Amino acid sequence: MATVDVRLPTVLRPAAQGQSRVQVDGAAVGDVVDELIQRYPGLGSNLVDDDGAVRKFVNIYLNDEDIRFLEQLATPVADGDEVAILPAVAGGQ
Amino acid sequence: MLRFERSDWLAMLAEAWARYPLEACGLLVGRPGPTPDQDVVERFVPIHNEAASSRIYRLDGREYARAALAADDDGLDIVGVMHSHTHTAAYPSATDVAEASKPLVPPTWHWVIVSLALGFPELHSFRIEDGGIREESVGLIEVNPY
């Protein structure tokens, strides 16, 4: 079990009592997300779908690396790691 | 009115041209005002276009995360996104509106588009809220020289 620092985007802060950083325990990114949602249920539907998969428009980073390029939600975390949640941004002409 | 430093305004035009024929993109990092109309851009951060396309852009994940966290560390916030249109007018496309309307994207964000369609860079800024597009004026943060 590790303790990580979760950084929340502006739009999600109201659902987490206005906090931009939250310390959460877990062994993998998935545990961290579960624990976060358990603590702040308002975050739930914004982050994961009914099957518990990360929503398409959500990017989750572990120390600047998109977890899609790691082991997704099974990516292990270590003490002091930083998990950042950001909206995916794209577009075009 | 969305306000920029002169150097950031020039950097956005230069970035659009430098990346041509690919779409350029970047983040507007700033200080949110009491209302979005009073937001001030403190720095423009060019971000690599992961899609490497002349038709679409996707912010490089790692650069985006770094810029967002650095902004937060500095007590600033992402207040908008810049991208270029290489062959069409500086006006949000259907894709741009759809992307801006996704759940985690703040409705307060400013969408700066630099068009190269006329052969020289032309910058416009928009707010996209509830699927509606509204152009906003842009201005420079000027120190009175007199």
Image (spheres, rainbow, N blue to C red):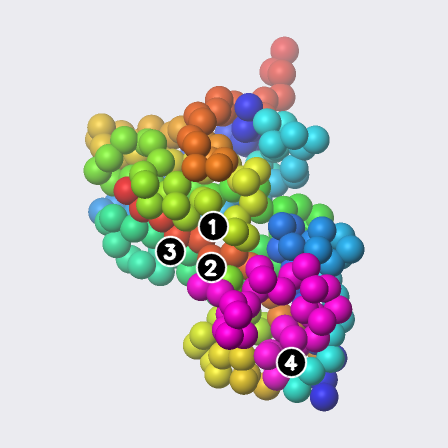
Label 2 CA crowd tier, 10 Å (few <14, some 14–19, many 20+): some
- Circles 1 and 3, Cβ within 8 Å, touching? The answer is no
| Residue drawn 51% across the image and 29% down it | B6
Specify which label sits upstream in the sequence, 2 or 4: 4
Which residue type does callout 3 highlight?
A: Arg
Bounds of the magenta segment: A28-57
Which residue type does callout 1 highlight?
A: Lys
* Distance between mark 2 and mark 4 Cα atoms: 20 Å
Image quarter in which the C terminus of chain B is found: top right
Helix, strand or loop at label 3? It is strand
Q: What chain does mark 2 sit on?
A: A
Which residue type does callout 2 highlight?
A: Phe
In percent of width and height, residue A58 lies at 51, 62
**Residue located beneath label 4 in the image:** A31
| Residue drawn 52% across the image and 67% down it | A49
**Residue located beneath label 2 in the image:** A57
Q: Is residue A45 magenta?
A: yes
Helix, strand or loop at label 1? It is loop
Helix, strand or loop at label 4? It is helix
Query: Please, is residue B54 above or below residue B11 in the view?
Result: below
Label 4 CA crowd tier, 10 Å (few <14, some 14–19, many 20+): some
**Residue located beneath label 3 in the image:** B58
